[in-house]
Image (tube, helix red, strand yellow):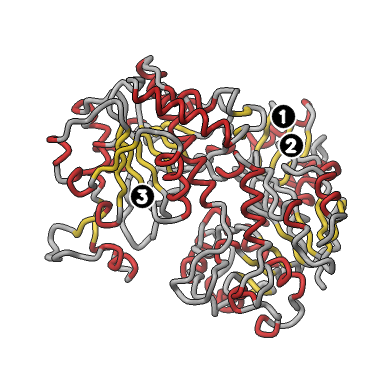
Amino acid sequence: MNKIGIRSEEKHWDSRVTISPDNITNLPESITLYFQNEDVRKLPFKNRVFSNSEILEAGKSGGAKTQIVPSLEGCDVIIGTKEIKESYLKIDETQFQFLTEILQNAKIPFPELVLNKKRSLVQLTDFLSEEQKASLLNLTENTPVENLMKQLLTEQSNLIEQGKSYVFFSHTHKGQSYNMRMLQELINKKCTLIDYELMRDGTDAGSARTVSYGNWAGIIGILDTLWAFGEHLYLKTQTDTPFRKIRDSEYFDLKKCEYRSIKLLKQLFSQIGQEIKQGASPFPLTIGITGFKGKVGKGALEVLENWGLPIEILDAVDFIEGASERFEFSSNKIYLLKLEYQHLYRPKSALNLKNPDIRQIIKEGKGGLLRSNMDKVFPQLNIFLNCIVWNADSPRILSNSLLKTIFEKRQSRSNPILPVIGDISCDPNGSIQCCRDTYSNSPVYVWCPENSDEPILPDTDLKKLPSSYKYFDLKLDGFVVMAVTNLPCEVPREASLTFSRDFCTRRPELNNKSYVECLAEADFKSDLAHSRLPEALKNAVILYKGKFNSQNKQLFLKDISRALIKNKLIHSEHILEIV
């Protein structure tokens, strides 16, 4: 029986737990869960949403046993939520000054090394290259920060242990460039990587995902986007709307960056709905949403359609083709467009395609035959919600050039601000090209096309910047973008409870066992074929003992290989060694 460890989350403002106390009792008594002791680790932002005492008490109530341990070193399988790559240490004023000077004079850039004066922290946001490590140790040798740098590098190296099996949202299976160093660290240490995103109720192409935070991402994404719309409108024009209340201290804990209660929010939205019916909106509000049939989109629709807002659904085709000009809009309602693929894209003008199946064209990898249709849709919206992840074979839904064109024609708009973008799927440099992920303490930024040559895009990591950064100022003239990387952490208890329920549920595709039971009983010392993992769970394996699971059709192996090579993490002639 494998020892199962539950790690703490390093990612800013994330306190979610994959196995919550109320689901521990549903697991067999033969399993012991080892939770990392946060009192020892002292993470700088938030401790897990469930206390040590809640976890220990659950282990005494029948079902799985629980222990709080200072380290997960003795565990075989380590379960977490988000990527594993960030490390922190406390620094004093003298160390801060020395490091600042060293980094300013360094010939090799260290964008992964961040100094946080407000919290007295030095942070590594990603694994360094061997060249960077050697240079940093050389630069700090015989200085007051020499031991600090050695300790910080050691802390980060210990995040991923040799030969262990890891389960988390890795965001690597499509070759996402920003996580390739972490992936290479897992490869180098011959680890096994299992990804929640690939866990499905079968092995065929039509099988559905079984565990996700998608519904909560949709719910929180629409809340944060509506707040951003209200705040931007007020700061730009001094026009108030009830949406500004969403992040008031009564409903949102600014210290923890999380909402206080879903019940309170539903009461607030019922009140907002009544205020809009009575004329609280200065003009008719039109919202467009993509991906509304998926879990993320359904979460957003739950708020829009079921929380008391006066929603009227418009026919997307009529709206796009100009029928909206003949329609009498009322400021007492909110108008909703549900946008499908045929609304987002159209064939290139030179093609003679009659009644094309746009989604099928994209599935077949022929997205080059299409162009974005958002030049017709986006300018007519007040809020655009993106709930789909971009397929790189298709055109971007909103390219920077398209946004710049719309920006330049903004004088013709009757509304005082440009459309606000809620990229709930948070796909950096994806379907919305100007998307850069943020954290909940600074959930939105402004992309100003007239200043697009400045380093806000594409090279600036907004998550590392203080709240005083100028592009966080919602008074700016441009496109407001909400793109929080871990939206469900704004309701950590509720999100953890539903995720844990799904993760601990016994499933027919797992031989009537839960994922936790399968992981506890697996034989990770054998090869993958004899690991005792059910086929549906093998399909979630990205790496097995440091090599890619080449049988997994969900892996974009060509894209992963290109990303590893592009990031200079592996030479092309060595790719076959890890497949």
Mark 2 residue crowding within 10 angstroms, few (<14) / some (14–19) / many (20+): some
What's the mark number on residue 290?
3
Mark 3 residue crowding within 10 angstroms, few (<14) / some (14–19) / many (20+): many
Q: Could you say whether the residue bearing mark 2 is in a helix, strand or loop?
A: loop
What's the mark number on residue 44?
2
Name the side, left or right, on which 495 lies relative to 229.
right
The answer to whether residue 152 is above or below residue 448 is: below
Task: Compare residues 395 and 94 and report the one nearer the observer.
Answer: 395
Callout 1, which amino acid?
Answer: Arg
Asked if the residue at tag 3 contacts the one at tag 2, i.e. Cβ–Cβ closer than 8 Å, the answer is: no
Q: Could you say whether the residue bearing mark 1 is in a helix, strand or loop?
A: loop
What's the mark number on residue 119?
1
Callout 3, which amino acid?
Answer: Thr
| Marks 2 and 3, how far apart at CA | 36 Å
The answer to whether residue 401 is above or below residue 363 is: above
| Rendered location of residue 524, percent (x, y) | 74, 76
Q: Quadrant of the N terminus?
A: bottom right
Any part of residue 146 in sight = no
| Marks 1 and 3, how far apart at CA | 39 Å
Q: Residue at x 56, y 52 (%)?
A: 213
The answer to whether residue 53 is above or below residue 267 is: below
Q: Residue at x 66, y 80 (%)?
A: 528
| Rendered location of residue 468, percent (x, y) | 55, 24
Q: Quadrant of the C terminus?
A: bottom right
Q: Residue at x 28, y 52 (%)?
A: 344
| Rendered location of residue 545, percent (x, y) | 69, 74
Figure quadrant of residue 503: bottom right
Figure quadrant of residue 454: top left
